[in-house]
Image (spheres, rainbow, N blue to C red):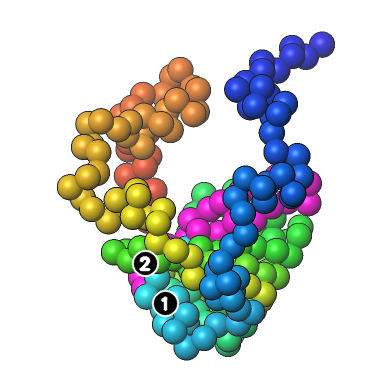
Amino acid sequence: MTSPVASSAFDSLRLDAVRDQEALRRAYGLPSDAAVRKQMTELTEQTQRLIGCSSLVLVASADADGNCDVSPRGGPAGFVAVLDARTVAIPDATGNKRLDTLQNVVATGRAGLLFVIPGRTTTLRVNGRACVSTRPELLSRLTAVGKPPASALVVGIEEVYPHCPKSLLRSAAWKPEQWLSADAQPTSAEVTLAQLRLPELTIADVEQTEADSLKYRYE
């Protein structure tokens, strides 16, 4: 017999959570005309240029059961290729081979993107159909993060939306003077060690593994 799962704060809060769209809208009111109007179904010259300036894109996906995932993709500015006004392609650089995002896309054919530009507070949201391509002539174009990738995430654009800067302004993401000091944060190795739950591992072991993996990251 399996032991019951311990309850969490979520289990309590969901009891009186918002139940329908009408209740949600009552809490917020209606969006402005501009907030609705600036959503488009294809890229303009300006949003294509924004994508060309982005070195980081967050990819949202979900599997067939609705289990969600957000994963970062990074490279030099312009590593995401704009194939036309309704199509972008993201090279899948060397990673951990879990393939969470790619498996989700294969299952559902959908993805959402958030393009981030260092130093800029406005982000660009792109949502739409998605597929995983291994077509050689496409992959040979996507070498900004090293050799041609094993695959590319291709998104057929249905929604383009320049997102307001408030969240990045509130976070002071681009203000180093407001960042927490390194000693106020757990290190990557400390986080990984706790996640792995292997008593025989040490911090030094994990630090060495991380250093080795980064050494060959772009191959």
Residue at the right extreme, as displayed: 1
Which quarter of the image is occupied by the N terminus? Answer: top right
> Label 1 to label 2, Cα distance in Å?
8 Å
- Asked if the stretch drawn in magenta spans residue 68, the answer is yes
Residue bounds of the magenta highlight:
58-77
Whether residue 200 is visible here, answered yes or no, is yes
* Badge 1 density bin: few <14, some 14–19, many ≥20, Cα 10 Å: many
Please state if 172 lies on the left or on the right of 91 as rendered.
left
Front residue of this view, candidates 149 and 32: 32
Residue 26: x %, y % from top left: 67, 47
Which quarter of the image is occupied by the C terminus? Answer: bottom left
Q: In this view, does 69 lie above or below 152?
A: above
What label does residue 114 carry, if any? Answer: none
Residue 99: x %, y % from top left: 61, 53
Residue 116 position by quadrant: bottom left
Q: In this view, does 152 lie above or below 41?
A: above
Residue 187 position by quadrant: top left
Q: What residue is disc 1 on?
A: 50
Front residue of this view, candidates 40 and 52: 40
- Say what amino acid the circle numbered 1 marks: Leu
Residue beneath the point at 50% across and 28% down: 196
Residue 6: x %, y % from top left: 66, 15
Residue beneath the point at 47% across and 80% down: 47
- Asked if the stretch drawn in magenta spans residue 141, the answer is no
Mark 2 element type? loop
Q: What residue is disc 2 on?
A: 117
- Say what amino acid the circle numbered 2 marks: Ile
